C-alpha cells in the first residue's frame, strides 16, 4: 500500500488494474463497503500446514496509505486517470476494518488469513501490498517451522541474508524465521530492526588470509574467546586437531564454545570431531554444522546419530527452494449487503465474511471448521479484529515474542502426522459449516448457477 514517506516507486506498489478498477468504481458510485478475503487455495505438496506471518507489515502499510504529489504526478502522466479520481487519491486514507489470524498461527488451505472490509475502491487498492507482505513472510515462516522441527530442539541460526531476494526479503525473512522458532540471525540489520538475537562465526576467508591455519584460529580465539571456530578450510579433522592443540596452549584461557563443520560428510566428520574433542577433555565444545542444509538433511543427520548441537541454515530456508510460492488469493466475498462468489474451476470463492473455528480435544487440534463470520461454533475462533476504521486495535500491535511463543504452542498442538516432514495421510481436516454451505447455495441460486 502506498505510504507518504516512501519513494514514488514504493508509493505505487499497486497493480495497474487496481487503479483502473478503483476509478471505475468511483465513476459508477460503487463505494459501499466490500469484504475481501486473503487465503491460500491449496497447500504445496511438501506442506502439511502453513504458519501465518506478515500481518504487522500489512497493517502498517494500510495505516500509512497516502498518495503523495510525486505519485500523483506519475499517475497523471499515464493519461488514464481523471482529475476527479486523482483528487480522490490525494485525499485517500484507509478507513476500513481488518480481522486476521495472529502471526504464528498454523493455517490450512482455504482458510482466511486476513479479511478486510472497507469502501470498495479502498479495499481493492489494498490487494497487492497485503498479498505481497503476507505471502513472503508466510512462505518463509512455513519453511523455517519445518527446519526447526527437524532440528529436534537444537538451535537453528539464519544464515540466508546474502542469497535472499533483496534486502527487504532478508530482513522480513529473519523476522519470520524467528517467529517460527529460529534462534538467531546473522543479519545485523534485522537484529537492529526487530530485536532478534544475532549470531555469527567466521568465514573461510579469515583462515585463508593468514599464512598458517593454527595462527588464524589462535588469533581469532584470543580476540573473541567464546567464539565458534571454522575448521574445514583445508582438512576438517586436521583443523579440529589444531583446536585441540590451541586448547592445550591456552589452558584455562581457552573458552571456545564450538567448532563449525561446513562441508563434506557432516555426519562422519561430526563423529570424528566429537571423538577427538572428548578424548582431549573438551566435551563442552559443541559441534555446529552448516553448508546447504535443509530440513531433510538435518533430519537425516540426526536419524543417523550425528553428534551435532546446532545448525546454520542459509539458502534453502532463505528462498524456501522446495515451495517458494503459494497459490495465495485476495478475493471479493461480499458487497452491497450480499455474499459474492466465484465459480471458476479450481478457483471457487465462497460467499461472505468468514470465521475459522479450531476444534481441540485434550489440548490438541483435531479439525477446523470454516464458517460464516457471525455464526456460533464450539471451536476456538481464529480470526480476531486487528484494525477498526483504519486504526490498529490492541490485537493488531506487533509483539514478536508473543508471536514466537504462539507459534511454538500452536505447532506443538497439531497432530503428529501434520508436524511430520512427509505428506500427511490423511491431511488435517477442514470442514465447511452448514451455514456456509447454505450461503453458498443461496448465492448460486441468485446467479442462476
Image (cartoon, rainbow, N blue to C red):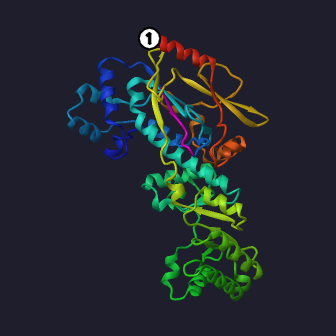
Q: Quadrant of the C terminus?
A: top left
Q: Nearer the viewer, residue 57 or 87?
A: 57
Residue extending farthest to the right is 362
* Number of residues whose C-alpha sits closer than 10 Å to that of mark 1, classed few (under 14), some (14–19) or many (20 or more): few
Q: Position of residue 301 (x, y in %)?
A: 66, 63
Give the structural element (helix, strand or loop) at label 1: loop
Find out whether residue 43 is within the magenta segment: yes
Q: Can I make out residue 303 in this image?
A: yes
* Closer-to-camera residue (66/160): 160
156 vs 92: above or below: below
The foreground one among 155 and 347 is 347
Quadrant containing the N terminus is top left
Q: Which residues are magenta?
A: 36-45
- Which residue is drawn at the image coordinates 46% and 19% (left, top)? 340
Q: Is residue 90 visible?
A: no
Q: Residue at x 52, y 61 (%)?
A: 188
Amino acid at each position: 500500500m502506498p505510504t507518504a514517506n516512501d519513494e514514488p516507486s514504493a508509493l505505487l506498489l499497486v497493480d495497474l488494474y487496481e487503479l483502473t478498477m478503483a476509478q471505475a468504481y468511483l465513476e459508477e458510485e460503487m463505494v459501499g463497503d466490500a469484504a475481501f478475503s486473503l487465503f491460500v487455495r491449496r497447500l504445496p505438496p511438501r506442506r502439511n500446514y502453513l504458519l501465518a506471518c506478515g500481518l504487522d507489515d500489512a497493517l502498517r502499510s494500510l495505516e500509512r496509505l497516502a498518495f503523495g504529489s510525486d505519485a500523483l504526478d506519475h499517475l497523471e502522466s499515464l493519461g488514464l486517470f481523471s482529475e476527479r479520481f486523482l483528487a480522490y487519491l490525494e485525499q485517500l486514507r484507509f478507513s476500513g476494518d481488518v480481522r486476521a489470524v495472529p502471526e504464528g498461527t498454523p493455517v490450512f488451505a482455504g482458510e482466511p488469513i486476513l479479511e478486510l472490509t472497507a469502501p470498495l475502491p479502498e479495499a481493492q487498492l489494498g490487494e497487492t501490498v497485503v498479498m505481497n507482505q503476507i505471502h513472503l513472510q508466510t512462505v518463509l515462516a512455513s519453511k523455517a517451522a519445518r527446519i526447526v522441527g527437524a532440528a529436534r530442539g537444537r538451535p537453528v541460526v539464519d544464515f540466508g541474508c546474502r542469497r535472499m531476494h533483496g534486502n527487504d526479503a532478508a530482513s522480513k525473512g529473519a523476522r519470520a524465521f524467528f517467529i517460527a522458532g529460529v534462534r538467531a540471525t546473522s543479519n545485523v540489520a534485522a537484529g537492529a530492526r526487530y530485536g532478534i538475537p544475532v549470531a555469527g562465526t567466521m568465514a573461510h576467508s579469515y583462515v585463508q588470509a593468514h599464512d598458517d591455519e593454527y595462527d588464524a584460529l589462535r588469533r581469532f580465539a584470543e580476540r573473541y574467546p567464546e567464539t565458534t571456530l571454522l575448521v574445514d578450510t583445508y582438512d576438517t579433522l586436521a583443523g579440529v586437531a589444531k583446536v585441540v592443540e590451541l586448547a592445550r596452549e591456552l589452558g584455562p584461557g581457552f573458552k571456545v564454545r564450538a567448532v563449525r563443520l561446513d562441508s563434506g560428510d557432516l555426519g562422519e566428520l561430526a563423529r570424528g570431531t566429537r571423538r577427538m574433542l572428548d578424548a582431549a577433555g573438551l566435551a563442552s565444545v559443541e559441534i555446529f554444522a552448516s553448508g546447504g542444509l535443509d530440513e531433510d538433511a538435518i533430519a537425516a543427520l540426526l536419524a543417523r546419530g550425528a553428534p551435532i548441537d546446532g545448525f546454520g541454515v542459509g539458502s534453502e530456508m532463505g528462498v524456501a527452494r522446495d515451495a517458494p510460492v503459494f497459490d495465495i488469493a485476495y478475493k471479493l466475498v461480499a458487497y452491497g449487503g450480499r455474499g459474492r462468489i466465484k465459480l471458476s474451476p479450481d478457483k471457487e470463492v465462497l460467499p461472505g465474511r468468514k470465521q475459522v473455528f479450531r476444534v481441540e480435544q485434550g489440548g490438541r487440534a483435531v479439525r477446523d471448521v470454516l464458517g460464516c463470520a457471525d455464526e456460533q461454533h464450539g471451536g476456538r475462533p481464529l480470526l480476531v479484529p486487528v484494525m477498526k476504521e483504519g486504526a490498529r486495535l490492541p490485537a493488531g500491535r506487533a509483539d514478536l515474542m508473543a508471536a514466537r511463543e504462539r507459534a511454538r504452542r500452536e505447532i506443538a498442538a497439531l497432530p503428529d502426522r501434520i508436524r511430520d516432514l512427509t505428506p500427511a495421510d490423511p491431511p488435517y481436516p477442514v470442514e465447511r459449516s452448514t451455514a456456509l454451505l447454505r450461503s453458498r447455495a443461496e448465492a448460486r441460486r441468485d446467479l442462476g448457477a
